[in-house]
Image (tube, rainbow, N blue to C red):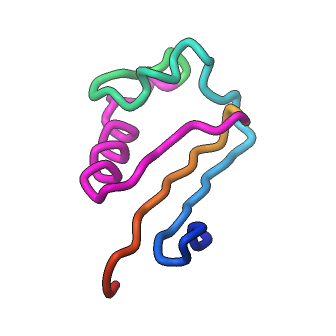
Amino acid sequence: LSPDVSGTGLIIEVADSGAGVPAELRERIFQRGFSTKASSAGGRGVGLALVGALVRDAGGTVEIGTTPSRFTVTLPGGGAA
């Protein structure tokens, strides 16, 4: 968790040591109902879709970094917390 470059928003980075998301699936992982083969044993494909929707609704962005297991959420500032 860190401030964005403007100092009013937030950047949240999440990383792990997992296998990551293959490049060919990166455009789809935020779609509702989408699940990778690795997560299909227990996943329903709603977690990242929910994250993506909430972040976009808040005016932010969520991206997959160049490290396959790193996600970056950027949320704008603009008022009292």
Q: Residue at x 55, y 63 (%)?
A: 11
- The percent position of residue 50, horizontal first and vertical second, equals 30, 44
Closer to the camera, 13 or 56?
A: 56
Q: Residue at x 29, y 52 (%)?
A: 54
- The percent position of residue 19, horizontal first and vertical second, equals 70, 28
Closer to the camera, 19 or 4?
A: 4
Q: Residue at x 50, y 68 (%)?
A: 10
- The percent position of residue 16, horizontal first and vertical second, equals 69, 45
**Image quadrant assignment for residue 12:** bottom right
Quarter that holds the C terminus? bottom left
User: Magenta segment range?
Assistant: 39-66
- The percent position of residue 60, horizontal first and vertical second, equals 38, 54
Closer to the camera, 34 or 60?
A: 60
Total numbered labels placed on residues in the image: 0
Whether 32 is drawn above or below 62: the answer is above
Farthest residue to the front: give it.
6
